[in-house]
Image (tube, rainbow, N blue to C red):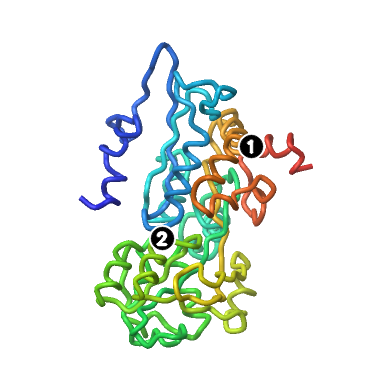
Amino acid sequence: MRRRDLLLSPFALAAAGLALAPSGRPAQARVAGDELRFFRILTGSAATTAFPIGTLVASAISNPAGSRPCDRGGSCGVPGLIAVALTSPGSVANIAAVANESIESGFAQADLVYSAYSGEGLYFRRAKQPNLRVIANLYPETVHLIARRDSGIQDIRDLVGKRVSIDRAGSGTRFNAEIILNAYGVRLSQIKAAELDPGDAADRLAAGEIDAFFLIAAYPAAVVADLTQKGIATVIPLAARAIEAALKRHRFFSREVIAANSYAGVPETETLSIGMQWVVSETANAELIYDIVAALWQPASRKLLDGGHIKAQQIRRETALTGLSTPLHFGAERYYREVGLLS
């Protein structure tokens, strides 16, 4: 059984203290007379940054019955709440699950959240999802184009005729890979496209079975670091001048620079980034969402985030509303008004 399958399986939920009810939802339980509430967070592939960030966020907002008090070094999350991060195919799948209320929450790229809410872009011919609401903007996700060093790929246009993974259908990476290819004048039909999970893509690139793959993940991404450390791959720049048309047309993109030596042997590299947002359904309980947001931004959570994944250090209350073009959930809006981030 692969790691991704394990993280999605009933065994993983059981390990997190979650038993599945016949409906597929975690069964409710009572311990010492107190009702436990479960709150799931769909993240992304185990090879992306979203999953480890999701586990940190889940820890920050959890406070199971019987935990030591916050002021005595115990959990400072929402009393009686157990949150768990789950892997998933990515943003599009997460949005669908949140919108149809089969999951409590999920992480999704800002571009796709707005597209789904407004019925534009990728969702122009799909049913729009007006019940989507945002809890917070979390951190920037960086666009990576990773290529084998011996592939001859130095520029995105060199992908023509090459074996390239554009990620799975339903992923935000797939959606944005097509936008970026088009900006450089490369049609999907001109590459030998593969639809692989980032972890599988990395394995196949290492084995010489593909030449390159797209990944959208906060840097430094572990899967990229492993390939560059072994001297197998490098990161291809997405130069600002060539990408200007995409930046003007798709305002959810921002310019990003991967700092030199973030990956072994990779110099400073121009690329793009997209904000990662945490979304729920409009029907989510307002008091619970208020409590979750308050728990996320309290001091103990800051220590947890700063001590975890390096990208979690960029999850800041002062940037929680950055890049929002989709409405906040009422519970989250109430919190941000109380702390002065909204007037």
Q: Position of residue 337 (x, y in %)?
A: 73, 38
Instruction: Give the class, few, some or many, for how many residues have Cα within 10 Å of label 2's Cα (few <14, many ≥20).
Output: some
Q: Position of residue 44 (x, y in %)?
A: 41, 53
Instruction: Give the class, few, some or many, for how many residues have Cα within 10 Å of label 1's Cα (few <14, many ≥20).
Output: many
Q: Quadrant of residue 323?
A: bottom right
Badge number at residue 330: 1
**Residue farthest toward the left in the current orientation of the protein:** 1
**Residue farthest toward the right in the current orientation of the protein:** 343
Does 124 sit left or right of 223 as displayed?
Answer: right
- The three-letter code of the residue at mark 1 reads Phe
Q: Mark 2 or mark 1: name the one nearer the start of the chain.
A: 2
Q: Looking at the image, is 59 positioned above or below residue 89?
A: above
Secondary structure at badge 1 equals helix
Q: Position of residue 102 (x, y in %)?
A: 40, 40
**Which of these two is toward me, 115 or 142?**
142
**Residue farthest toward the top in the current orientation of the protein:** 33
**Residue at the spot x=20%, y=50% of the render?**
1
Choose mark 2 or mark 1, whichever is in front. Answer: 2
Q: Quadrant of residue 342?
A: top right
**Which of these two is toward me, 196 or 313?**
313
Quadrant of the image for the C terminus?
Answer: top right
- The three-letter code of the residue at mark 2 reads Ala
Badge number at residue 222: 2
Q: Position of residue 223 (x, y in %)?
A: 38, 63
Q: Looking at the image, is 126 positioned above or below residue 178?
A: above
